[in-house]
Image: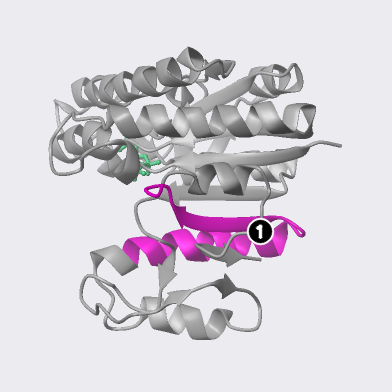
Amino acid sequence: MSELILLKLGGSVITDKTRPFTARIDVIQRLAQEIKSALAERGDDLRLIIGHGSGSFGHEVAAKYQTHKGGTSAESWLGFAEVAHAAATLNHLVVNALREVGVPAMRFQPSASTRTRGEQLMYFETFPLKEALSHGLVPVVYGDVSVDAAQGMSIVSTELLFDNLARELSPSRIVLAGQVDGVYEADPNLKPNAELISDIDRNNWEEVAAMLGGSHGTDVTGGMFTKVRDMYRLTIAMPPMQAMIMSAEEPGHLEAVLKGQMVSFGTLIN
Ligand code: IPE
């Protein structure tokens, strides 16, 4: 049976977060090439579902309309369409880059197939995606807007889509490729000496959770804490699945991970 990997390209790595609506096209093209190389080497042995974040595309507009908080104003539904458009604009760039190097990528628009309830994904129509995957295509999903049973509308992150897909498809790995090298003991922006945690498992989870969720928590570690906690819970629920948090900034790193090579970077959660 071939290996299935769910790969997220973080919004922080594929866009310039300091500039609205700015994609890092060179990075997207390089990552597409790395994905292509891994698929070419492994052939039928590797199946991939790719997801990507929204970075300075969707987040900007979502903040303007407060989409994650629901239908709060007369403008909210206009905002729903605006955020969806921003997210889809970046998605076109990613899918184009993948297709240009020969990856048989096909987008599945989450806002057309999901329903959330607050933080939870109540419904996700995955049948067409699974059918495409089983025929050798590489489905691509992305952080998007979603209709929401409790508040009218919400945002569905790539991680939430992956959580659902993982429970349905039992992948062997989830790879979250972003701009940070992995999980640090403390926010490296505040503590330059903070050390990278290479493994998170049952043995050190309590300790790691205390470090990340402690009073030193900032937005950066806070965001990372939720991500790590959700991935940890998922790996506990879905053994022997592993999750890896890594940086895709260094050329070749993503390719090595997808090829299944032993690597000495990133944080492995299992
Ligand atoms: C965010 O998706 C989606 C929108 C704001 C529309 P993600 O949570 O998957 O994206 P990043 O990695 O934070 O950009």
**In x, y percent, where is residue 234?**
63, 58
**In x, y percent, where is residue 255?**
55, 41
Residue at the location (28% across, 19% down)?
Answer: 85
Relative to residue 240, is residue 17 depicted above or below? above
* Residue at mark 1: 262
Mark 1 element type:
loop
Residue at the location (42% across, 47% down)?
Answer: 248
Relative to residue 5, is residue 133 depicted above or below? above
227 or 153: nearer the eye? 227
- Which quadrant of the render holds ligand 1? top left
**Residue 62 counted in the magenta span:** no
**In x, y percent, where is residue 155?**
36, 38
Can you say which quadrant of the picture contains the C terminus? Answer: bottom right
**Residue 223 counted in the magenta span:** yes
Question: Which amino acid, mark 1?
Answer: Met
Circle 1 residues within 10 Å: few <14, some 14–19, many ≥20: few
State the image quarter where residue 75 is shown.
Answer: top left
- In the picture, measured across the screen, residue 233 lies left or right of residue 267, that is right
Q: How many marks?
A: 1
The magenta stretch is 222-250
- In the picture, measured across the screen, residue 181 lies left or right of residue 162, that is left
State the image quarter where residue 26 is shown.
Answer: top left
Residue 45 visible in rendering: yes
Relative to residue 260, is residue 267 depicted above or below? below
**In x, y percent, where is residue 151?**
34, 39
Can you say which quadrant of the picture contains the N terminus? Answer: top right
Residue 145 visible in rendering: no
